[in-house]
Image (cartoon, rainbow, N blue to C red):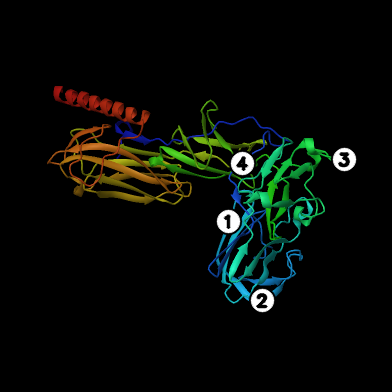
């Protein structure tokens, strides 16, 4: 039977790192305009020999694009009589380009598809041609009337077997959006051989999405959006509300009349609305990772604060710019409430107290009911754990030559308590580690005790020090951390002193 006064306990402590909360701001737009992580958009068309390659990058203002209709597997090469013909009115030649790759991705604020078409143009006679594609329903959330069907096209000519292709119009298509905050945002559109190019951008052109962007100017390939460009009746704060999307489309025409078009998607930055999705214990239960998210916004910095419910002065903080955030400092078996804060140029949004639910740091304890001079086999060890995964496995194993002394399953609350008798097969002379292992959030946590056994299976020493193992097979693990090791060492010393006093008393008698 277990004698409580003789239990030597080793307690595993878990740690969690948390991010400090920033002040919450509401009802404001971004404090500074940002334009980063752009890639070129517009059709990228080239001909090598008689092989034509056309890459199209399309973006739309939502990750929820169930209504999106793709560009299809082929596109026709259409004959036109003049570069002045309206786009999409050419006559099919029967020559097609087929899709050779399609890459779709959901970004934080929008979704995009990169499609590459390729085909053989050798059968085309000399003449003028266009490639034209149109797709449906991609920009439902656009605030200006560019929310109609999307189209892109390029024109080229063939003469004496030689192809003349419109150089590509380079413009930004968002990976991270522009933040429109009333301060001037400028976007530059470049065209190779600019001296021979003109930019079509008048407000009556369909290339502005049927209506120009409010509070903007566009000249010489430079688009400026800012409060100072607002016209009569235009109020910046009423137009560019947080979270709204806007589209700008432009066309360039070379000296021969060949056109190329490109579009840029804008989103007014909004304050994040974060939530904590999950956490996981790592490093043997000494640390944990927390994942938090904020849908449809870019987050520049994260902060998480966890407060011990039983001791409000026990506050854990940490920061990061990406997920997960690693958190340190949790007290074993203590329960915490965690709050996440997400910040961008528009302000800071936070979760509320209790939104994620309480998290309890895992706790394992291994107590030995024997000491120096006791017989090893037949004595007991008390195994206890809490804060573990419900109905998950736990084991007690002796190293270095591994011998599993016990295995069990936690109860529905993730706890267990069992007394285990040391078997005869564990009587191996030398120094050994007794390691208790459980799982929390599918990550391993452990607690250890160290014993030395002589050739007659008597206990030579029990303490919290890391000892040299009797044989190879597993590396020793330091017992607990901080207070856990100190508690074990003091308990061992007290136990040996008690045993010495008891034996002295018996001898004197």
The residue located at (27%, 48%) in the rendering is: 405
Name the foreground residue: 469 vs 292.
292
* Tag 4 secondary structure: loop
Q: Which residue is mark 4?
A: 355
Q: Which residue is mark 3?
A: 233
The C terminus - image quarter: top left
For discs 4 and 3, the disc positioned in front in the rendered view: 3
Give the mark, 2 or 4, whose residue is nearer the N terminus. Answer: 2
Residue 342 in view, yes or no? yes
- Within-10-Å neighbours for mark 3: few <14, some 14–19, many 20+: few
Q: Quadrant of residue 30?
A: top right
* In contact (CB < 8 Å): disc 4 and disc 3: no
Q: Which residue is mark 2?
A: 93
Q: In the drawing, what numbered circle is on residue 105?
A: 1
Name the foreground residue: 80 vs 415.
80
* In contact (CB < 8 Å): disc 2 and disc 4: no
The N terminus - image quarter: top left
The residue located at (70%, 61%) in the rendering is: 151
- Identity of the residue furthest to the right in this view: 233
Q: Quadrant of residue 71?
A: bottom right
């Amino acid at each position: 039977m277990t004698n409580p006064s003789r239990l030597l306990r080793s307690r595993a402590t878990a740690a969690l790192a948390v991010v400090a909360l920033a002040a919450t701001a509401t009802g404001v737009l971004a404090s500074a305009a940002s334009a980063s992580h752009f890639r070129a958009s517009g059709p990228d068309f080239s001909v090598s020999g008689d092989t034509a390659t056309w890459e199209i990058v399309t973006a739309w203002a939502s990750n929820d694009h169930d209504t999106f209709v793709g560009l299809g597997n082929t596109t026709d090469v259409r004959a036109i009589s003049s570069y002045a013909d309206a786009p999409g009115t050419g006559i099919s030649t029967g020559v097609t380009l087929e899709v050779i790759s399609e890459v779709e991705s959901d970004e934080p604020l929008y979704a995009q598809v990169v499609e590459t078409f390729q085909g053989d143009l050798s059968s085309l006679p000399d003449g003028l041609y266009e490639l034209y594609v149109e797709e449906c329903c991609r920009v439902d959330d656009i605030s200006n009337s560019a929310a109609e069907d999307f189209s892109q096209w390029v024109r080229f000519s063939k003469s004496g077997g030689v192809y003349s292709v419109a150089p590509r119009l380079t413009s930004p298509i968002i990976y991270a959006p522009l933040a429109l905050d009333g301060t001037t945002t400028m976007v530059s559109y470049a065209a190779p051989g600019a001296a021979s190019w003109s930019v079509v951008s008048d407000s009556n052109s369909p290339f502005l999405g049927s209506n120009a962007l409010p509070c903007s100017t566009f000249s010489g390939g430079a688009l400026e959006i800012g409060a100072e460009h607002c016209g009569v009746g235009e109020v910046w704060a009423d137009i560019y509300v947080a979270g709204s999307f806007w589209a700008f489309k432009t066309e360039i025409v070379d000296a021969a009349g060949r056109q190329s078009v490109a579009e840029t998607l804008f989103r007014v930055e909004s304050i994040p609305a974060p939530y904590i999705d999950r956490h996981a214990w790592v490093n043997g239960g000494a640390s944990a990772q927390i994942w938090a998210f904020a849908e449809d916004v870019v987050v520049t910095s994260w902060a998480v604060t966890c407060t011990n419910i039983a001791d409000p002065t026990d506050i854990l903080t940490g920061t990061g710019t990406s997920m997960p955030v690693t958190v340190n400092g949790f007290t074993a078996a203590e329960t915490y409430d965690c709050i996440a804060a997400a910040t961008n140029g528009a302000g800071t949004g936070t979760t509320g107290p209790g939104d994620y639910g309480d998290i309890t740091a895992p706790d394992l304890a291994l107590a030995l009911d024997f000491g120096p001079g006791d017989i090893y086999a037949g004595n007991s060890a008390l195994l206890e754990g809490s804060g573990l995964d419900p109905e998950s496995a736990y084991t007690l194993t002796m190293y270095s030559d591994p011998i599993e002394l016990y295995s069990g399953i936690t109860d529905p609350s993730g706890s267990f308590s069992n007394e285990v008798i040391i078997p005869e097969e564990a009587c191996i002379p030398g120094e050994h580690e007794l390691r208790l292992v459980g799982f929390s959030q599918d990550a391993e946590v452990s607690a250890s005790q160290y014993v030395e056994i002589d050739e007659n299976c008597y206990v030579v020493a029990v303490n919290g020090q890391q000892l040299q193992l009797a044989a190879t097979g597993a590396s020793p693990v330091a017992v607990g951390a901080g207070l856990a090791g100190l508690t074990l060492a003091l308990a061992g010393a007290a136990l040996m002193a008690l045993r010495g006093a008891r034996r002295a008393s018996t001898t004197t008698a």
